[in-house]
Amino acid sequence: MKNVLISGASIAGPALAHWLARYGFTTTIVENTAGFRDGGYAVDFRGAAHLTVLRRMGLLDAVERAKTGMGAMAYVNKDGRPVAWMPADLFAGDVEILRGDLARILHDATRGTTEYVFGDSIASLDEDAGGVTVTFERAAPRRFDLVIGADGLHSNVRRLAFGPEERFVQGLGVHCAIFTVPNHLGLEYAGHVYRTGGQLASVYSARHNTEARAAFYFGSPDTDVHRRDVARQQEILTERFAGTGWECDRLLAEMRHAPDFYFDSVGQVRMDAWSRGRVALLGDAAYCPSSLSGMGTGLAMVGAYVLAGELAAARGDHRVAFARYEDVLRGYAAGCQKMGDGVAKLMMPSSRAVVALLNRYYRLLPYLPGKNMAAKIGRRTAEAIDLPDYAGVPTRPTS
Ligand SMILES: Cc1cc2nc3c(=O)[nH]c(=O)nc-3n(C[C@H](O)[C@H](O)[C@H](O)COP(=O)(O)OP(=O)(O)OC[C@H]3O[C@@H](n4cnc5c(N)ncnc54)[C@H](O)[C@@H]3O)c2cc1C
């Protein structure tokens, strides 16, 4: 029986484990956080391909039950008065869910069939003809047939097997911060977005309006902050947004007490190959389209479906399966990345004149003939794949 080690227990990793367990593989997930990581921002599924994968996993109902149910977002001026509206299907897709809630559903669905190791990380990978010897930061070394890096934009497996992050991660010139705040505006399944030249602040209700998420985006070609230096990150955010109007000062004050402060550059991962020998990458680790694309979660889930299906179809022969995985998915991933590029340019216009123009556009949007165009482009991108049907594949890998 094939023995697969997956690094990363967020979305892509558990989704892959779910499928591999169904096909008779043995799966272990190593995750570097001390325990299951809850919380986080809202992510979305759009179009037939995403929903088909969820349905085939048997998880569509659970995801629907946990959906955020968000309505439209209002663009507000510095006094908080709505000046334009963004329709829900533009940013929330067909089903929007908090990342932590989705991760919980995937974790619950896999913990009976997958070994989870929290609070550890792969230290080295040593491949030979028969498998991979893996050493860990804490646990004793072990042997696996295959190793999959599903450990996100800053993938550890990618660094160990392919080389330093700078070779593969391309910043889009934007930084983002997200954290939980009290729902002090009393938002009901709604959000407010406040935009000034080059930056954007927003707050939206979460968990059935019992709390809210604050999200900040700002243009930043060269903000070189250590990813774990939270104090400096919060300082940068304060320098950027303090005194800029609307609710920014209040949200920045709440930031100091947030249980889940997240800060990162917005980037994409571009690689010529997603596998090397017995090691392959999945989800953001391999082809992150950026958080701005609204596609990362669906793409990661589709990627897990295809990678597992091809491994099963090839009876565990990774050479065949990894090549097929790329054939099926590469064009689709490229489309999602193009979407991320486009949104980055639109979302962070650098001049006030363009901001004013966009606000006017959103104000008129409900009356324009092409009002659903942006949502349609998103859906078309999300559906641009012929999902293979793996229903009849063997459920016992042999090679
Ligand atoms: C702010 C923000 C907003 C987003 N909004 C959307 C959206 O609206 N729609 C959408 O579809 N997507 C959105 N995304 C993207 C989406 O979250 C990702 O594309 C998706 O989660 C990909 O999942 P993943 O499992 O590949 O990576 P991740 O979710 O990044 O998970 C990687 C996992 O690996 C773990 N890990 C890291 N290093 C190690 C290590 N050394 N050892 C072991 N484990 C490790 C991490 O702790 C984490 O659990 C957003 C992302 C962000 C950051």
Image (tube, grey):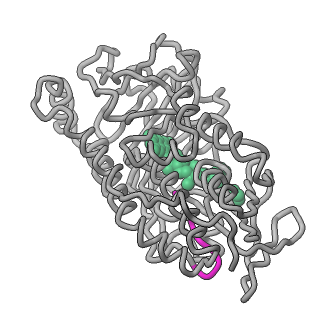
Which residue occupies 48% across, 10% down? 186
How far across and down, in percent of the image, does residue 322 sit? 54, 74
Q: Who is closer to the viewer here, 217 or 103? A: 103
Asked whether, in this view, residue 137 is left or right of residue 150, the answer is: right
Q: Is residue 147 visible?
A: yes
How far across and down, in percent of the image, does residue 127 sit? 72, 83
291 lies above or below 94: below
173 lies above or below 80: below
Q: Is residue 176 visible?
A: no
Which residue occupies 74% across, 49% down? 33
Magenta span: 276-283
Q: Who is closer to the viewer here, 134 or 211? A: 134
Which residue occupies 64% across, 38% down? 105
186 lies above or below 380: above
Asked whether, in this view, residue 306 is left or right of residue 120, the answer is: left
- Which of the 4 quarters of the picture holds residue 16? bottom right
* Residue 278 lies in the magenta-colored region: yes
* Residue 271 lies in the magenta-colored region: no
Quadrant into which the N terminus falls: bottom right
- Which of the 4 quarters of the picture holds residue 165? bottom right
Q: Who is closer to the viewer here, 9 or 395? A: 395
Task: Point out the residue furthest to the bottom here.
Answer: 129
Which residue occupies 58% across, 32% down? 62
How far across and down, in percent of the image, does residue 261 sit? 61, 37
Task: Point out the residue furthest to the top here.
Answer: 186
